[in-house]
C-alpha cells in the first residue's frame, strides 16, 4: 500500500512519514460491494478498517445509530480492548477499505507505538461521546 494514500485518510493524516511507512507495509486494501456486512455485533474484533471510499450504516440491536464515510474507522475499540464488536456495520455503497489485523496492530505497538497511542486516543474520544 502507498503511504501517500494513507495520509489522505484523516485517522492517519497526523502521523509522520516513518509511521505511515510502517502502516503501509502492513496494511491491505479491500474492495467490498454494497450490502456487504463488514462487522457483526457480538463477534470478536480481529481487524481495524479505515474507510477510504464509500459509505456504511452502523446498527446496534437492529437500530440504525450512525452513518460512516471516507475517513471513518471501524473496529479499533474491539482490537485495542480485545472485546466483542458493539455494533453491526454494513456497506451502503461499494467501498474501498484499508485493513490492519490485530496481529498488524501488535507489530505496530512494537515498531511505532505512536500509531497505537493515536488509535487509543480515538477510542477514548468515542467512549466520551457514546
Image (tube, helix red, strand yellow):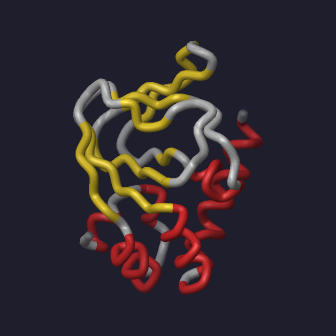
Q: Quadrant of the N terminus?
A: bottom left
Nearer to us in this view, 124 or 91: 91
Q: Residue furthest front?
A: 43
Nearer to us in this view, 31 or 84: 84
Q: Residue at x 72, y 33 (%)?
A: 130
120 lies above or below 20: above
Total numbered badges shown on the rendered structure: 0
> In the figure, residue 94 lies in which quadrant?
top left
Q: Residue at x 42, y 80 (%)?
A: 22
27 lies above or below 82: below
Nearer to us in this view, 18 or 101: 101
Q: Residue furthest right?
A: 128
* Image position, residue 72 (x, y; %): 45, 45
Q: Is residue 21 left or right of residue 129?
A: left
Q: Is residue 72 left or right of residue 95?
A: right
Q: Residue at x 27, y 51 (%)?
A: 30
* Image position, residue 88 (x, y; %): 52, 29
Q: Residue at x 36, y 67 (%)?
A: 27
> In the figure, residue 33 lies in which quadrant?
top left
* Image position, residue 53 (x, y; %): 27, 44
30 lies above or below 60: below
Q: Is residue 84 left or right of residue 1?
A: right
Amino acid at each position: 500500500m502507498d503511504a501517500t494514500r494513507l495520509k489522505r485518510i484523516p485517522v492517519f493524516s497526523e502521523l509522520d512519514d516513518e509511521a505511515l511507512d510502517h502502516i503501509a507495509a502492513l496494511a491491505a486494501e479491500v474492495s467490498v460491494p454494497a450490502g456487504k456486512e463488514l462487522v457483526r455485533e457480538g463477534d470478536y474484533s480481529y481487524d481495524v478498517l479505515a474507510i477510504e471510499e464509500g459509505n456504511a450504516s452502523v446498527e446496534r440491536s437492529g437500530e440504525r445509530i450512525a452513518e460512516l464515510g471516507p475517513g471513518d474507522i471501524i473496529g479499533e475499540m474491539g482490537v485495542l480492548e480485545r472485546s466483542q464488536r458493539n455494533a453491526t456495520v454494513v456497506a451502503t455503497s461499494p467501498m474501498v477499505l484499508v485493513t490492519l489485523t490485530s496481529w498488524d496492530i501488535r507489530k505496530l505497538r512494537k515498531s511505532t507505538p505512536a500509531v497505537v497511542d493515536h488509535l487509543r486516543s480515538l477510542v477514548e474520544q468515542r467512549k466520551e461521546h457514546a
